[in-house]
Amino acid sequence: MELHDTENAAQFDTKVECQAWIDSRVVRFKLRMVNVTRPGAATTYDAQKFDGKIHNTRAEDFKESGTDEPLKLYAAPTKQGEVWMAAMVVQES
C-alpha cells in the first residue's frame, strides 16, 4: 500500500496511541444529490458523500453534525518505519 502525505500526518510511537487518536475523531461529509438509474425503475436522486473533513470530538468548539461518521470506519493504525500513522483508504473517482 502506498501512503500519501506522510510528512503532514500525525505520528505516534505506539499502535495504542494511534488508535486513541483515530477513536477521538469523526469525518464530516458534505452531501450532494446525484442521478441514479435503477434497473426497472425510473431515474431517482440519491445523496452521495463527498469532501470529508476530519474533526476532533474532544475539541472545545466541536459540535456534532448529522453527517459525522467515526473515523475508525475509514482509518486504521499503520506502521511505517518506526512510527505509527492513521492510514485512510480513499476511493478515487
Image (cartoon, rainbow, N blue to C red):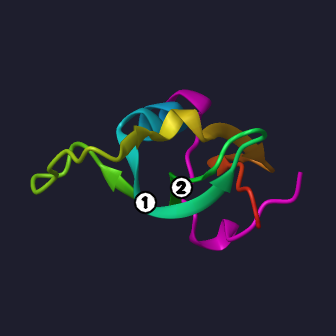
Question: Disc number at residue 48?
Answer: 2
- Identify the residue at horizontal 23%, vertical 48% (top origin): 65
Few, some or many residues within 10 Å of mark 1 (<14, 14–19, 20+): some
In percent of width and height, residue 18 lies at: 53, 38
Amino acid identity at mark 2 = Gln
Quadrant of residue 9 within the rendered picture: bottom right
Q: Is residue 90 visible?
A: yes
Name the mark on residue 69: none
Q: Which residues are magenta?
A: 1-16
Q: Say the numbered circle drawn on residue 31.
A: 1
Front-lying residue, 51 or 6: 51
Q: Is 33 on the left-hand or right-hand side of 83?
A: left
The residue located at (10%, 52%) in the rendering is 60
Residue found at the very far top of the displayed protein: 16
49 above or below 92? Answer: above
Question: In the rendered view of the protein, which quadrant contains the C terminus?
Answer: bottom right
Q: Percent position (x, y) of residue 41? A: 68, 42
Give the residue type that dot 1 points to: Leu
Q: Judge from the rendering whether residue 39 lies leftward or rightward of residue 76; answer left or right.
A: right
Badge 2 crowding class, 10 Å Cα cut-off, few under 14, some 14 to 19, many 20 or more, is few
Instruction: Point out residue 53 in the picture as x, y percentages from the top left corner.
Output: 43, 62
Number of disc labels = 2
Q: Position of residue 46 (x, y in %)?
A: 52, 51
